[in-house]
Amino acid sequence: MDALGILFEKYKDGLILFIYGIVGDSKDAEELMMDTFAVLASGTARYTEKKEASFKTWLFAVAKNQARHFLRKKSKYPVTEVDIERDLKDLEEHPESLLVQDEAKVELYKAMEELNDEYRQVLYLMYFEELKPEQISRILKKTVKQTYNLAARGKTALRKVLERMGSSWNTWDM
């Protein structure tokens, strides 16, 4: 249990931000992060050490699968007035301001919200979680070449968003 607590503290914030980028709701992202650790604790999915796939890669893949399952399940149920009120409250509480301390990264994260899902996921894993394209390809179930292509297209789209926001593209080491 001590090891699980250490892993939780190390990865929880990054997982919440990653999942939030998929589901778009901070409370759902927190619940799905907890579900991800429940999968880990229950042994439902087990990490097997591999040279080409780190534990972090595996954990983010589990989180992505939890988020996708949640979205599939959620689409079967209609949106209620309670859901709308909760979503409006979530818009006021930007989870990135609580989780991302560096002001420049907050700006980058906000710019990434305007990108399509695949670009945002690749760039988030690359810049916020500092994963390599090979690791990202495993999480997103893409080839390494597809991951490089998504990253290149995502950077181009991100550059346009940052320029539109008045940020200097040269600020970012990309």
Image: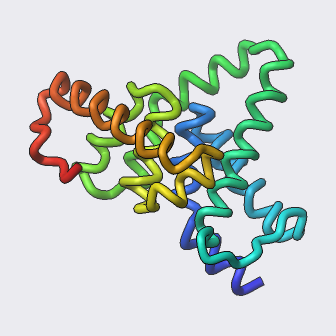
In the depicted structure, whether residue 81 falls above or below residue 6:
above
Question: Residue 8: x percent and y percent?
Answer: 64, 70
User: What count of labels does the image hold?
Assistant: 0
Viewer-side residue, 109 vs 59: 59
Which residue is the extreme one toward the front?
145
In the depicted structure, whether residue 58 falls above or below residue 142:
below
Q: Residue at x 44, y 35 (%)?
A: 119
Question: Residue 47: x percent and y percent?
Answer: 76, 71
Question: Residue 81: x percent and y percent?
Answer: 72, 13
Viewer-side residue, 15 vs 122: 122
The N terminus lies in quadrant: bottom right
In the depicted structure, whether residue 34 falls above or below residue 64:
below
Q: Residue at x 72, y 55 (%)?
A: 62
Give the colour scheme of this rendering: rainbow
Would you identify the image quadrant in which residue 2 lies?
Answer: bottom right
75 vs 15, left or right, is right
Question: Residue 37: x percent and y percent?
Answer: 74, 63
43 vs 137, left or right, is right
Q: Residue at x 70, y 84 (%)?
A: 3
Would you identify the image quadrant in which residue 49 lies?
Answer: bottom right
49 vs 146, left or right, is right
In the depicted structure, whether residue 54 falls above or below residue 106:
below
Which residue is the extreme one toward the bottom?
2
Q: Residue at x 60, y 44 (%)?
A: 142
